[in-house]
Image (tube, rainbow, N blue to C red):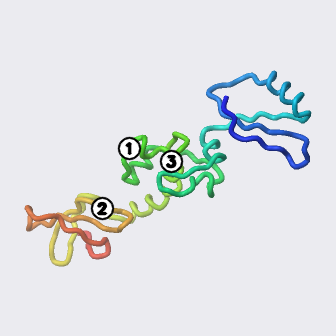
Amino acid sequence: MKLIEVEYTFDSSKIIFYFTADGRIDFRNIVKDLASIFKKRIELRQIGVRDEAKIIGSLGICGQTLCCSRFLTDFQSVSIKMAKEQNLSLNPTKISGRCGRLMCCLKYEQDTYSYLLSTSPKIGTRVKLNDDLGVIIDINILNGNIKIKLDEKPDAVPTSTNLKYISII
């Protein structure tokens, strides 16, 4: 058992202890002991690791306060598929938050990535850039840039351009 936070109600009638634990623990004796010491009603609440990170707070790998501490009110499910769509490294240390689970911001940013992916051409699409024809070999969704390998220059270095300047053929 790891004690995370203690809350004392405004009316002074109850003390709430928030804790994390690996499994289920019988706290009847602890509750009796605490009630006799504090002379108040005692409540023990087991919380998850994400709730622990939210309560304790910290900085994320982005350098900002954790999203769960700052503005997220509920925890939605996050999947590896989201990290793949956002073209992130699948290294667990890079996509895990302070709580050890997948970062909440993956879900928070997913709608934007889904929209940008649905409006962007796919890798391998034939395109026209000015008067040259080529094929898309890489896309940077956030910058709106793509790399195109031009047909008539097979040994040339791929050309980068903005999505606005191409025509899909």
Name the amino acid, label 1.
Answer: Leu
Query: How packed is label 3: few (under 14 Cα within 10 Å), some, or many (20 or more)?
Result: many
Q: Secondary structure at mark 2?
A: strand
Which disc is residue 139 wearing? 2
Name the amino acid, label 2.
Answer: Ile
Residue drawn at the location 30% of the way across and 61% of the way down:
139
Residue pointed to by mark 1: 90
Which disc is residue 103 wearing? 3
Residue drawn at the location 54% of the way across and 50% of the way down:
104
Front position in the image: 153 or 32: 32
Whole-angstrom CA distance, mark 2 to mark 3, is 24 Å
Q: Secondary structure at mark 1?
A: loop
Q: Position of residue 36 (x, y in %)?
A: 89, 28
Residue drawn at the location 64% of the way across and 42% of the way down:
52
Whole-angstrom CA distance, mark 1 to mark 2, is 18 Å
Do callouts 3 and 1 mark residues in contact (Cβ within 8 Å)? Answer: no
Front position in the image: 37 or 147: 37
Whole-angstrom CA distance, mark 3 to mark 1, is 12 Å
Do callouts 2 and 3 mark residues in contact (Cβ within 8 Å)? Answer: no
Which disc is residue 158 wearing? none
Q: Mark 2 or mark 3, which is nearer to you?
A: 3
State the quadrant of the C terminus: bottom left
Left or right? Give the position of 5 relative to 162: right
Q: Position of residue 10 (x, y in %)?
A: 87, 49
Q: Secondary structure at mark 3?
A: loop
Name the amino acid, label 3.
Answer: Met
Q: Mark 1 or mark 2, which is nearer to you?
A: 1
Q: Earlier in the sequence, mark 1 or mark 2?
A: 1
